[in-house]
Image (cartoon, rainbow, N blue to C red):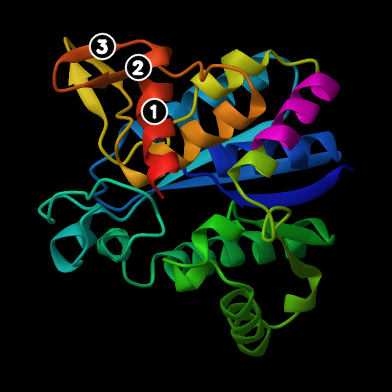
Amino acid sequence: MKKQAVLSLSGGMDSSTVLLRLLTDGYEVTCLSFDYGQKHRVELERAQQLVNFLNDSGQKVKYGVINLDGLAPMLNSALVEGGDEVPEGHYEQENMKETVVPNRNKIFSSIIQAVALSIANEKDTEVRIAMGIHAGDHAIYPDCRQEFRDADYNAFTEGNWDADRVSNVTPYLDGDKFDILKDGAICCEQLGLDFDTVYANTNTSYKPINIAGKWYSDYKSASSVERVEAFIKLGRPDPVSYADEGGVVNWETVRNHVEQILNAA
């Protein structure tokens, strides 16, 4: 039996790369996405598309969506329907705290822990649980820090029998999006996957734009800026399609905008 892992798959670049890393390391992966009323629900479509592509390419990935959208009216965050406008700029800016969703990773973590422990008991095996958190998240999102992950795991082991069968894996906790993207390229090569197809099936934008029924990423919100910065450092264009209030834009426009932000920082 293959090694087992359960992953919180948002549909974004980070958790999608964790999925690639787990597959490269020989895991059979169960992925869970969460519909919590986020404005950028297109990420759920991208997660499904990526899983379909991976399974069609010979990988073995299970996938499900947990419906939590009833939470949205009760949550105070710019990321959920009914919340304030998503701010633009770089993650290091103070106003980016408006994108925090209260206790989001604890909610997600509790569910993937429950699923992982169920798999561990059913198959009598050890299971790893994974999330795509990284160092770039630490300043704004406290639930992406090591201290939180340790406290969360301690609560899990205190509250469940046989919880020691389940352990955390956070391969990019000390890295940034560039580190993630570099490892993604390595994983794609080792798995025989097309890099552009993989990352075209991800969404990092918190302010996606719909034009004639097709979703495009924005390039001004903090999550998008950080993603574009990683592709610039990697030296290759992002395969995701971008747009702004004027319509579809090319990679050069996106790159120039982000470079201006980085130079002004």
Circle 2 — which element? helix
Where residue 123 appears, as percent x and y from the top left, is: 80, 56
Per the image, the residue denoted by label 2 is 253
Measure how far apart labels 3 and 2 are at the Cα level: 10 Å
Q: Is residue 45 magenta?
A: no
Q: Is residue 219 above or below residue 151?
A: above
Is the N terminus in the top left, top right, bottom left or bottom right quadrant?
Answer: top right
Q: Residue furthest bottom?
A: 158
Circle 3 — which element? strand
Q: Nearer the viewer, mark 3 or mark 2?
A: 2
Where residue 244 appears, as percent x and y from the top left, is: 21, 22
Q: Is residue 191 above or below residue 70?
A: above
Q: Which residues are magenta?
A: 181-191
Amino acid at circle 1 = Glu
Per the image, the residue denoted by label 3 is 248
- Residue 182 image-quadrant placement: top right
Per the image, the residue denoted by label 1 is 45
Q: Is residue 122 above or below residue 198?
A: below
Measure how far apart labels 1 and 2 are at the Cα level: 26 Å
> Residue placed at 40% from the left, 54% from the top?
91
